[in-house]
Image (cartoon, helix red, strand yellow):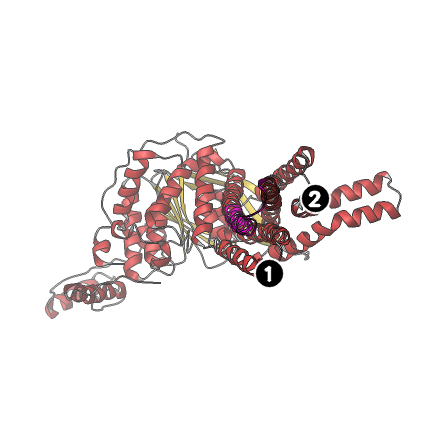
Amino acid sequence: MTNAENTSTLQPFNASTPTKRYRPFSFSRIYAITINTVTELTRLKVFYVLLVFALVLIGSSIFMAQFSFQQEFQILKDVSLGAMSLFTSLLAIVATARLLPQDIEDRTLYTILAKPVPRFEYVLGKIAGVLVLLAVSTVLMGAAFLLVLYMREQAVIHTTLRQMSGAPPDQLADALRVVRSSAFNINILPGIVIIYLKACLLAALTLFVSTFATSNIFTIVVMAFIYFIGHLQATAREYWLHEHSSGLITRIFLAVVTLLFPDLQAFNLVDDIVAGTAISLAVFAKTAVLGVFYTTIYTLLAAFVFYGKEL
Amino acid sequence: MTDPAVAVHGLTKVFPIPFHRQSIVAVKDLNLRIEPGEVYGLLGPNGSGKSTTLKIILGLVSPTRGRTEIFGRDSRLVESREAVGFLPENPYFYKYLTGKETLRFFGRLCGLRGSALKNRINELLDLVGLSKAHNRRLGTYSKGMLQRIGLAQALIHDPRLVVLDEPTAGVDPSGSRDIRDLILDLKRRGITVLLSSHLLAQAQEICDRVGILADGVLVREGHLQELIAIENQTELIIANASDNLIREVESIVKRSNAELIERRKSTTTLERLFLEATKKNDDARMSSGEGATKQK
């Protein structure tokens, strides 16, 4: 604090600022919280996760120079989409877990909620901020992956052209078609959208857990648990239904388990993409609707618990 | 009859202890009425229920029994907070935001935007003396500066009531004096101030009325001067008095059957001594070109 500042404390201010009437729902308040959350997360340098992703990509492409181009493209897609799924999930959990507890610990939440801001708007603003961050991260990772894939494809095409310079044109065209089809297929794009939706679901679930958690660590541990159960639950459910009768009580029990532990394996389309199997519109739509449904339900549950929370 | 700035009716707050049969009674059957334009001090030791009372008034905590109102509106309603600015105890805010960004964020939450918001931010930065530090992140602010930016955000939407929870806790005497001056300035502007404190000397300087809480119960309440005045005693402070004059005054006191209780040299306060000493030191440093900006 400087002396100059000390002496200027009693400057008069104009008290005629126009006051706005309170509106029960305001997009501009939610927008303010969303932008603030994005600023918070970017200034906390969570984007370093992207740097790790880039390193994984570069590392894997160097390692794969020794394989045939079909194997190379397959491994590149497998590693990149797998890493994308893992890093966006990690980012969703770690970035969201700290948002509420940190605001409570720093008492920032008191100052926000002491303004005319309904609690559900605060929750919506927070989750929207995380979803924006996840969207930007997914786009950047996806772009980096497609760029590396394109560069490798061009390198293989260049090598093929050189090696088959004397071959008949239709043989050369066939060879190039094989290279192109094994590099990029249209299924990659819906696959990336599903990866994003899985991260959104995890972010909303993390926010819900953090509304009643006592610390960040607790939230992250619970989410790690849910993450693993979520990947295993489909197999366990099938086994259970196979072994036991599928009566009403069993079905209700399984529905509750499915709500608590979302079937994350349903969002795993990487294997299909790598194998080149077409992802049908129906499968994509079903998975996308599931992702949006879970994200909405968990956000509403978070808003509900937070509404009654004593601060 | 106008609505009181704050009305608390039969307020009780009980915090259950998880897995125990006992519970903690933080506030017990509290009744308060704070008139518009007053500076009201809610005093009491740590754990006496001051912060809980303020949180209930602000709708952050729900009461077990009773109700609270702000300018006639139930404080559980979000719209009642249109009229309130709040500065919590030891606020941190978002360390990654600059002073200006912090005020912009809180202004937008209150529905301000455009040039109205911009002008309001500049006015408030001037008011709290942080114009020169507006582009610095809050992570580099000293505690006094954080309190002042906190006060600025509390005033962003031109509230009629300002609630301050321990506004000078942990702030050095100079920063503390700045905050006291700001509170007096708010009072001159007709803004009602409700503050909690356990720093009694400071509360004595600024409050019109005080309430003293002990174990969640209001044990005393009233106008400060009435509460602390000793009815049968009078103080005379005389400058340049000779020994003869003093002796004469003493003999008059004796003759009139009154009693002289104490005779002593006037002293300055430790706060004034501290401020004078540190001001001289700061002036010397400023004239030698040394900055005094505190980095955290």
Q: Disc 1 designates what residue?
A: A66
Q: Is residue A166 magenta?
A: yes
Residue A7 among magenta residues: no
Rendered residue at 37%/49% (across/down): B150
Which residue is found at the position 57% from the left and 61% from the top?
A63
- Classify residue B141 as left or right of residue A199: left
Quadrant of residue B243 within the rendered picture? bottom left
- Which span is picked out in magenta? A141-169
Q: Residue B178: percent from the left, percent from the top?
A: 28, 54
- Residue B30 visible in the picture: no
Measured from the top left, where is residue A30 in percent x and y? 47, 37
Task: Work out whether residue A182 or residue B148 is closer to the camera in this orientation and state it.
Answer: A182
Mark 1 nearby-residue class (10 Å; few <14, some 14–19, many ≥20): few
Q: Is residue A172 left or right of residue A282?
A: left
- In the displayed structure, A22 sits above or below A142; it is above
Q: Is residue B158 above or below residue B256?
A: above
Residue at image location 79% in from the left, 44% down from the top:
A253
**What's the residue at 88%, 48% (across, down)?**
A243
Inspect the image, locate mark 2, and give the three-letter code of the amino acid beneath it: Ala
Q: Which of the 4 image quarters holds residue A272?
A: top right
| Quadrant where the C terminus of chain B is found in the figure | bottom left
Find numbered disc 2 in the image and state the secondary structure of the residue it sits on. Answer: helix
Q: Magenta part mainly helix, strand or loop?
A: helix
Disc 1 chain ID: A
* Residue pointed to by mark 2: A266
